[in-house]
Image (cartoon, rainbow, N blue to C red):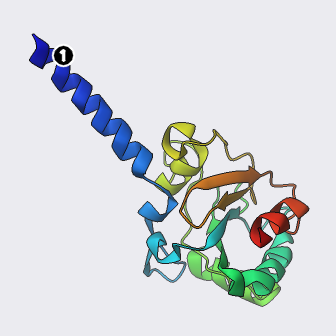
Amino acid sequence: MKKFILIPLLLFYTMLTVNAQQNFFSFKTTTIDGKPFDLASLKGKKVLVVNTASKCGFTPQYKELQALYEKYQHRNFVIIGFPANNFLSQEPGSNQEIKQFCEKNYGVTFPMMSKISVKGKDQDPIYAWLTQKSQNGKTDAEVSWNFQKFMIDGNGNLVDYLSPRESPMSDKVIKWIEK
């Protein structure tokens, strides 16, 4: 009888341990150019993750994101953009169209990834981790709109998130980077 109780307990404990060990750097994704990208290559850097869109009222935040990246990229800081079409079809373009738009209109040089889904049934696993306390160990943070920002520390842990309305150049972000 003890074996029947012990085995499920061990399986449950193993599932909890595996989940707790997963962090942002455990994931792999694809760049906007279609190349594999291992987020583990960013270990030791603070990462600002942003779901982006080209036809949104917050799209001008690309300018601030680029300025932030240029100012702090040499201080172990990086921004990663994840284009998503989850809100009123505000990112309808292909990866190539998105890349051209970002470069032409905002001079974006920070890493952009392939278009993904940040919510719903087809939510990308990275965003499932970012938004679910059961996975990230920190907080639940449903993506409310384009340009929501997630702050990841150099160990791959979720630190906090900012609403889409909050500027990437906010005191909260600057203090976090400079800390």
Instruction: Return the residue nearer the eye: 108 or 5.
Output: 5
Q: Residue pushed farthest top?
A: 1
Identify which residue is drawn at 64% across, 66% down.
83
In the rendered view, tell whether residue 22 sits above or below residue 68: above
x%, y% of residue 120?
A: 56, 43
Residue 97 in view in this figure: yes
How many labels, in total? 1
The residue singled out by tag 1 in the image is: 5
**Secondary structure state at the residue bearing disc 1:** helix
Identify which residue is drawn at 87% across, 69% down.
169
x%, y% of residue 121?
A: 50, 42
- Figure quadrant of residue 168: bottom right
Identify which residue is drawn at 64% across, 69% down.
47
In the rendered view, tell whether residue 53 sits above or below residue 62: above
**The N terminus appears in which quarter of the rendering?**
top left
Taking 69 as reference, is 15 left or right?
A: left
x%, y% of residue 23?
A: 48, 56
Taking 134 as reference, is 164 left or right?
A: right
Instruction: Return the residue nearer the eye: 85 or 134.
Output: 134
Amino acid at the residue labelled 1 = Ile
**The C terminus appears in which quarter of the rendering?**
bottom right
Density class for disc 1 (Cα within 10 Å; few <14, some 14-19, many ≥20) is: few
Taking 62 as reference, is 139 left or right?
A: left
x%, y% of residue 84?
A: 63, 61
In the rendered view, tell whether residue 9 sits above or below residue 89: above
Instruction: Return the residue nearer the eye: 14 or 148.
Output: 14
Residue 168 in view in this figure: no
Identify which residue is drawn at 70% across, 57% down.
89
